[in-house]
């Protein structure tokens, strides 16, 4: 089996001139709208005009709000009466939310009833899904128990990890050869070693990759350097090289300085109209303006595996972040499969089901293996 590369170039050839939208707002400041789609009229009306510069825009728009809400704080468990009632309220809100996004564990029978006679294809996000969110992105290790669970599930179902991280980094964390990996939000796709897909550059052999943003590499390296330089004096800021994307982390930056982080990122991005910015969990993600995302990567992998347009295939995608919504949407809109959102707080999503945290993801993966083994008897 080989990864087909018959896709037309996803590079958008007509970015807004000089990074400006029709309203004169830098395109990287607009809430993300998939390339190629028109901005809804309502959105156009609510975008604030520039006054004295970017900070005015940031403070008066939803941009800083997006930074603030990008990863809800963990709830502190204390015996304080006020905290207890807040916790109860949060629990009620979560249970109410679960009516719309039922737990994939309690709905397991429903899921497997639908999966009977079908081939499941499994797509897993990494951070916040297979590993818990931690302060230092370099220490987001996956537990051995989770690794075993992923390894076992991959024996029964084609399994891919689709991450915002660089392909190499996520592979280092996961360390399983039998999986497909799509790094840089799906812009760097590679298949299992046993199928001969892993990069063998060092041995001078062919590489089997799909890299729709390859032409952006020099630009991304340049921006990476500039971002490192311009944020080095902001305490706690961290710039991460994700090959085709750059992450600017502000999780460890004092909230008072978040606007400064935003300002510095903007000052650099205004010179790069072919790059855009999306929000992750306490992270600003700089990426090429191309018509490619995790949803497209799922479609690509299904096609490459000969699993698309098959009535008997059930793709399941598990993820926790906004970028995973592109994949949930592809599955929901095509009525193709199930998205499962990992979240401990209520969030609007295109997913069908939910899981609270990575430990529940592990339970779900284990349950899939048990179900598959028992249904094969
Ligand atoms: O698509 P993903 O695999 O979920 O990658 C998205 C980003 O994940 C990482 O950042 C997030 O996790 C860190 C470790 O827990 C956390 O410190 C950070 O605040 C989160 O945003 C990764 O470091 C980023 O590069 C990815 O873009």
Image (cartoon, grey):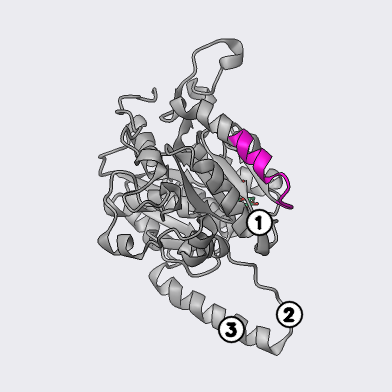
Instruction: Tell me where residue 84 appears, x and y as whole percent.
Output: 66, 85
Magenta stretch: dominant secondary structure: helix
Toward the viewer: 283 or 355?
283
Q: Callout 3: 10 Å neighbours few (<14), some, many (20+)?
A: few
* Residue that lies at the very extreme toward the bottom in this rendered image: 81
Element at label 3: helix
> What distance separates the C-alpha of mark 3 from that of mark 1?
27 Å
Above or below: residue 85 compared with residue 262? below
Residue at disc 1, CB closer than 8 Å to ligand 1: yes
Element at label 2: loop
Residue tagged 3: 88
Q: Callout 1: 10 Å neighbours few (<14), some, many (20+)?
A: many
**For residue 110, which quarter of the picture?**
bottom left
Q: Earlier in the sequence, mark 3 or mark 2?
A: 2
Toward the viewer: 190 or 19?
19
Question: Residue at point 38% right, 58% down?
Answer: 111
Residue tagged 2: 78
Residue 371 located left or right of residue 67 = left
**Residue 235 within the magenta-colored segment of the rendering:** yes
Q: Callout 2: 10 Å neighbours few (<14), some, many (20+)?
A: few
Q: Which residues are magenta?
A: 224-236
> What distance separates the C-alpha of mark 1 from that of mark 2?
23 Å
């Amino acid at each position: 089996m080989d990864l087909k590369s018959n896709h037309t170039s996803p590079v958008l050839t007509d970015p807004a001139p000089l990074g400006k939208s029709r309203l004169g707002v830098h395109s990287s400041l607009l809430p993300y709208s998939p390339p190629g789609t028109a901005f809804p009229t309502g959105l156009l009306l609510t975008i604030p005009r520039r006054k004295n510069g970017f900070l005015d825009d940031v403070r008066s728009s939803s941009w800083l709000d997006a930074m603030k809400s990008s990863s809800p704080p963990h709830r502190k468990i204390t015996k304080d009466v006020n905290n207890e009632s807040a916790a109860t309220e949060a629990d009620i809100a979560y249970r109410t939310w679960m009516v719309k996004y039922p737990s994939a564990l309690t709905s397991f029978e429903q899921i497997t009833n639908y999966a009977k006679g079908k081939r499941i294809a499994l797509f897993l996000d990494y951070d916040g899904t297979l590993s818990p969110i931690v302060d230092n992105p370099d220490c987001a290790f996956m537990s051995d128990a989770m690794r075993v669970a992923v390894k076992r599930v991959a024996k029964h179902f084609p399994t891919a990890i689709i991450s915002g991280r660089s392909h190499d980094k996520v592979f280092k964390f996961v360390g399983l050869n039998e999986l497909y990996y799509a790094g840089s939000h799906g812009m760097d796709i590679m298949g299992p070693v046993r199928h001969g897909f892993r990069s063998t550059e060092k041995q001078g052999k062919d590489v089997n990759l799909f890299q729709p943003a390859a032409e952006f590499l020099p630009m991304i390296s340049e921006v990476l350097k500039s971002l490192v330089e311009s944020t080095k004096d902001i305490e706690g800021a961290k710039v991460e090289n994700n090959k085709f994307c750059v992450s600017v982390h502000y999780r460890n930056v004092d909230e008072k300085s978040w606007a400064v982080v935003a300002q510095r990122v903007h000052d650099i991005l205004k010179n790069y109209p072919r790059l855009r910015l999306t929000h992750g969990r306490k992270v600003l993600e700089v990426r090429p303006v191309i018509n490619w995302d995790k949803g497209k990567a799922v479609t690509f992998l299904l096609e490459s595996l000969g699993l698309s347009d098959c009535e008997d295939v059930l793709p399941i995608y598990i993820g926790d972040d906004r970028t995973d919504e592109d994949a949930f949407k592809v599955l929901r809109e095509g009525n193709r499969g199930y998205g499962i959102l990992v979240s401990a707080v209520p969030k609007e999503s295109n997913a069908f089901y939910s899981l609270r945290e990575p430990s529940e993801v592990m339970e779900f993966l284990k349950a899939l293996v048990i179900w598959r083994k028992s249904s094969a008897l």
